[in-house]
Image: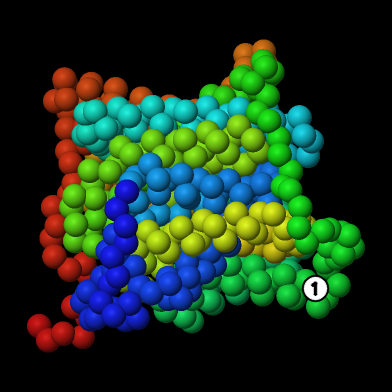
Amino acid sequence: MPLWNLHGDGRTVEPGAVVRPDERLNWPATIAIGAQHVVAMFGATFLVPILTGFPVSTTLLFSGLGTLLFLLLTRNRLPSYLGSSFAFIAPITAVNAGRALETPEQITQALVGVAAAGILLAAIGLLVQAVGTTWIDKLMPPVVAGSIVALIGFNLAPAAWGNFQRQPELATVTLVAVVLFSVLFRGFLGRISIFLGVIVGYVVAALTGQVNFDAVADAAWVGLPDFHLAAVADPAAWALVPMFLPVVLVLIAENVGHVRGVATMTEDPTINRHTGRALVADGLATTLAGGFGGSGTTTYGENIGVMAATRVYSTAAYWVAGIVAILLAFSPKVGVIFNTIPAGVLGGVTTALYGLIGVIGIKIWVDNRVDFSRPVNQYTVAVSFVIAIAGFAMSWGSFQLGAIVIGTVAALLIYHVGNAIARLRKTGADDGGPIPAVGPMGGDHLGEPV
């Protein structure tokens, strides 16, 4: 594993230059940047256990451990923080009819699904190591990948509304704060608008007497997280596993996108060679978390934002962030504080957050210029979205399939089978590829002389 070379004078980054993964600034600067990464990941990472009912401290612990494992397995060449994946919220809460888990038994059952998703992701990573990523692009072309990412966010909309209506005034304040922070600030602060919105909502709730601090005073400053072992011997837990498997498709898209993003920003295409290792590392980190009580992990866009703002891609900063997360996990008081966040604050922030997950999927279509004049593309999205938003479900005895699984299968089948039929019949209904770029869109020339 390569050591970090000191970048320049160790204090500054020259205009146009970047601090590469195998470089670092001096340690005070590196620690400061690592702290920024902790702040960037914190808002999203702690929300997942709050929304799913998993222990906050345990999730933080495996987030930090997963980050260090990721750095080791990618040979310290790929900067990334592994935070809690929002893609797991829907299948985890489905264990308790769409609500946060309430009993240790439910948690241990859900952990089997998390671990299974991690094992599958690691296996896919090994396959990518052997044969490359071309087959992923064919299995999940942009219209399918975007649909799967988006439907996971939209499927969670009823959960956001459930919390919102419990404290609508507080939820509205939080939601407005999230939106305002995103447009008031540029750079790093703008990228953590979700986190800042939660702080505003929490402060308002505390000032208006809507936060119960009784448990905080009783909690110890230092202590072990709450561990749960995956219920691998429980047949009911294995019946839930199919709900978790479509999440793997999202994790693939996120990891592949992360690797390509870092390669582009550092102008080092050789980083793309680590795609397979990234998938294996995230898969093993998710498996580790699922085995002992943490939520599944993924690479974090929030931390890419920090790298883009600072132009520091040093993996040393991520070692700092991972270690800090682990240290925070051993403070029960920190976990209890997060558990005091009122439902209204969660309702406000998730109204934006779940919608943003949907927007990420839509952005995949826009970036790849998906042609929605083609019936195959239209129905791939139309059917999968209605399934997800309406919450379709199927069951055979104790075996159940939730909306995310059904919507994912529908998107894959409609796209691939529909394309095969349309091309055989030459009807022109198939996906003909990206629409041509035609220059600036309407409105870009407003005010120009004609």
Q: Position of residue 182 (x, y in %)?
A: 49, 73
Q: State the image quarter where residue 21 is shown.
A: bottom left
User: At 28% from the left edge and 43% from the top edge, which residue is drawn?
Assistant: 274
In the rendered image, the vertical position of residue 424 relative to residue 209, given as above or below: above
User: At 14% from the left edge and 57% from the top edge, which residue is drawn?
Assistant: 437
User: At 54% from the left edge and 57% from the top edge, which residue is drawn?
Assistant: 323
Q: State the image quarter where residue 53 is shown.
A: top right
Pick out the residue farthest to the left: 450
Which residue is label 1 attached to?
Answer: 206
Q: Relative to 25, is 203 on the left or the right? A: right
The C terminus: image quadrant: bottom left
The answer to whether residue 420 of the structure is visible from this angle is: yes
Which of the colour schemes (rainbow, by chain, secondary structure, one colour) is used?
A: rainbow
The residue nearer to you, when weighing 281 against 30, is 30
Pick out the residue farthest to the top: 397
Q: Relative to 43, is 434 on the left or the right? A: left
The residue nearer to you, when weighing 400 against 378, is 400
Task: Indicate the secondary structure of the residue bearing disc 1.
Answer: helix
In the rendered image, the vertical position of residue 229 relative to residue 333, given as above or below: above
Q: Position of residue 23 (x, y in %)?
A: 30, 65
Q: Position of residue 324 (x, y in %)?
A: 57, 61
User: At 44% from the left edge and 27% from the top edge, which residue is drawn?
Assistant: 120
Q: State the image quarter where residue 300 is shown.
A: bottom left
